[in-house]
Amino acid sequence: MQLSPEQLTLQARAAELSNGLISARAAEVDRSREYPWDNVELLKQAGFLGMTIPQELGGQGRSFLDTVLVIEQMARSCTVTARIVVEANMGAISAVMAYGTDAQRKLAADLVLNGDKPAICITEPDAGSDASGMTTRADKRGNRYVLNGRKHWITGAGVSRLHLIFARVYDEAGEDLGVGGFLAIRGAEGLAVTKRETTMGLCGMPEGELTFTDLEITPDMVLLPPSGFKRGFADLMNAYNSQRVGAGTVAMGIAAGALQHATVWAKMREQFGRPIAEFQGLQWMLADMQTQLTASRLMLYTAAASTGPNGSAFPDPDLAAQAKIFASEAAIKIVNDALQVFGARGYSRDFPLERMARDVRMFTIGGGTAQVLRTLVASKLLGMKLPQTRDGYVNAPLTIR
Ligand code: FAD
Ligand code: COA
């Protein structure tokens, strides 16, 4: 894919920031497990937050492809920083920009342009892949809604200010109206962080559980999907396709960074009296890594530049799913092989490969697992609806001892 001169300049600017201060801080962000507010400030100054926000709201009106170029560069050095760029340009913020009222769009734009990374709240303890099985409810009371329920594994829990919460909507008679999006700001009464996860990687980005207890949503904070609540879930998931491309790009960027490290190391490290890069066993490994990386990049760029059916402003769901599946699985293999090129040092915390290997493992899980996304791809390919719910099956709440 041919990038424009302006896109190449944007990419070069992102690479410069990533190779400089972002790279220098990456190991410390991982070790401290603290949200990198300093990096948020750098991203803000560079104009990498809210790039997709329209110019009339203070953003740059950039495309998802432009955003992907920046994400890739950040992920080469620091996964947490790349994920901030994803969530400050895609997912919740793009849903608000597409579906929100003027006031909601202004509220969200002001928050993001001032350093917020919004949280998108879909997953629940008993509704992960089966996201439409959510039980968080929004009960209509007059012109307001009252939210009760629990979401978990919410990226940015405790640091994000703007929250987009998916909830099942009930009218005053208790009738299920469908799914809506509800906006809430950190600190609202009834919105609490009730757990922080201890993760294998991506340390520095809080993942947590949110509990809603009679969280009151005033009419101005209801994000009404364009087709109404009845098809609200489909509309909201449609907006989420942008974030799937973003997540796949983070994985691809980590892989690109790992391959770069491996290439440099293979030429530096000598065994048997010559650089290990001279061994064909490693050359073919590196060539396969490069091939997988190029394929991932092409798929992601194509998905980012695509649009979905019916005039959707978001990436095509099928292309986004294919790109995320391929890139996330390829990235795990590429990073693992890069670690192998480093020998024992790859396994050491003194080198970046072990951090990258921990970070990259997540991307076949979060944002729709590789298995669930295959169902989406198969459904499109076969032209068949593929319902996964077994009729008559009653779910027992999950308890882990
Ligand atoms: P489950 O749904 O329990 O799946 C378990 C296994 O079963 C998986 O291997 C899955 O692929 C497989 N499986 C399930 N159903 C099928 C099927 N029909 N066919 C074949 N295989 C199937 N969620 C948010 O809402 N907001 C966030 O910000 C967010 N951030 C996250 C950040 C991280 C680091 C992680 C790890 C997760 C995050 N999530 C977030 C949650 C994430 O989206 C879910 O983990 C994911 O959708 C899978 O749900 P689950 O973990 O409950 O797995
Ligand atoms: N983009 C656009 N539309 C989508 C969509 C997407 N990514 N995913 C689902 N939809 C639409 C479907 O096309 C369907 O519309 P239709 O009624 O016109 O056919 C509607 O939403 C319901 O989808 P369906 O697949 O029938 O729902 P389901 O109850 O079987 O649920 C999903 C399956 C969508 C929940 C599941 O495939 C999924 O994506 N799980 C992962 C959730 C996730 O990504 N969480 C990330 C949290 S950060």
Image: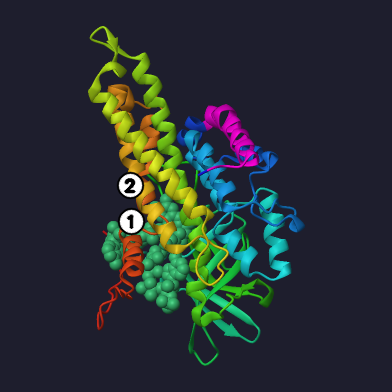
Please report whichever mark, 2 or 1, sits nearer to the chain's N-terminal start.
2
Ligand 1 within 8 A of label 1's CB?
Answer: yes
| Residue 4 among magenta residues | yes
Q: Is residue 287 above or below residue 46?
A: above
- On the rendered structure, is 21 left or right of 359? right
From the image, give the main secondary structure of the stretch colored magenta: helix
Task: Say which of 295 and 52 sits in front.
Answer: 295
The numbered mark at residue 370 is 1
Contact check, label 2 and label 1, Cβ < 8 Å: yes
- Give coordinates of residue 188: x percent, y percent: 63, 65
Q: Residues within 10 Å of mark 1 (few under 14, many from 20)?
A: some
**The C terminus lies in quadrant:** bottom left
Task: Say which of 77 and 212 sits in front.
Answer: 77
Q: Amino acid at mark 2?
A: Glu
Q: Is residue 134 visible?
A: no
Q: CA distance from mark 2 to mark 1?
A: 8 Å
Q: Is residue 254 above or below residue 84?
A: above
* Residue drawn at the location 54% of the way across and 62% of the way down: 314
Q: Is residue 62 above or below residue 254?
A: below
Q: Is residue 176 visible?
A: yes
Q: Quadrant of residue 267?
A: top left
* Boundaries of the magenta span: 2-25
| Residue 148 among magenta residues | no
Residue to which mark 2 is pinned: 329
Q: Amino acid at mark 1?
A: Ala
* Residue drawn at the location 32% of the way across and 29% of the way down: 286
Q: Residues within 10 Å of mark 2 (few under 14, many from 20)?
A: many
